[in-house]
Image (cartoon, rainbow, N blue to C red):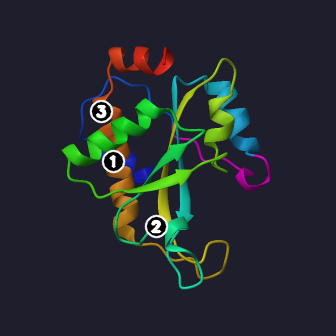
């Protein structure tokens, strides 16, 4: 989030942007439920960690460290938000990976998506090796690229986009 705000401060945009650090994501996304209900956003982007490659995990279920953030695709992700992330990443040469979530994403996007009358959501994941251990490992380039991608995504939005996201 901080990397996004640093990059966003250099860009022109017409959005009111809220950054929220939530609690209890692992036990029911409780923080996302409360914050999304209070803010009532039009678009919600969950920034989360994704499983990084390790010898014991399938390459099909993981992302490589240093190859960019994962752009989520699945049940909790609005297809046009997913497409816009891809478009922005290509336009600005930001490396990215796809992170498939065929069911519920297991992220705060689940709660954002169904808050009040619904929120168009997306997910950006930072590859993380050894998740939920004392030796979690990330590549700082992935964090910086996730922030940059989110900032350029935000700066690319206009009123027509919002209408398209809300009326899809």
Q: CA distance from mark 2 to mark 3?
A: 26 Å
Callout 3 secondary element: helix
Image position, residue 65 (x, y; %)? 41, 72
Callout 2 secondary element: loop
Per the image, the residue denoted by label 2 is: 63
On the question of residue 47 being in view, the answer is yes
Q: Residue at x 42, y 39 (%)?
A: 82
Image position, residue 167 (x, y; %)? 49, 14
On the question of residue 9 being in view, the answer is no
Per the rendered image, the range of residues in magenta is: 19-28
User: Which comes sooner in the sequence, label 1 or label 3?
Assistant: 1
Do the residues under discs 2 and 3 have CB atoms within 8 angstroms?
no
Q: CA distance from mark 1 to mark 3?
A: 10 Å
Circle 1 packing at 10 Å, graded few (<14), some (14-19), many (20+), is: many
Image position, residue 111 (x, y; %)? 69, 36
User: Which comes sooner in the sequence, label 2 or label 1?
Assistant: 2
- Of the numbered discs in the image, which one, if any, rests on residue 136? none
Residue lying furthest right: 27
Per the image, the residue denoted by label 1 is: 149
Query: Against 109, is 96 above or below?
Result: below
């Amino acid at each position: 989030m901080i990397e996004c705000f640093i990059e966003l401060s250099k860009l022109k945009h017409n959005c009111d942007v809220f950054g929220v650090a939530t609690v209890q994501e692992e036990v029911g996304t409780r923080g996302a439920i409360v914050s999304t209900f209070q803010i009532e956003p039009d678009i919600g982007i969950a920034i989360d960690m994704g499983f990084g490659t390790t010898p014991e995990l399938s390459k099909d279920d993981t992302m490589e460290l240093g190859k960019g953030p994962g752009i989520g695709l699945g049940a909790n992700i609005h297809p046009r938000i997913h497409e816009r992330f891809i478009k922005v990443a290509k336009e600005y040469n930001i490396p990215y990976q796809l992170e498939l979530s065929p069911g519920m994403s297991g992220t705060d996007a689940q709660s954002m998506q169904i808050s009040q009358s619904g929120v168009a959501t997306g997910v950006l994941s930072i590859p993380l090796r050894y998740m939920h251990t004392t030796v979690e490992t990330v590549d700082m380039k992935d964090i910086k690229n996730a922030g940059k991608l989110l900032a350029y995504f935000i700066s690319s939005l206009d009123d027509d986009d919002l209408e398209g996201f809300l009326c899809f």
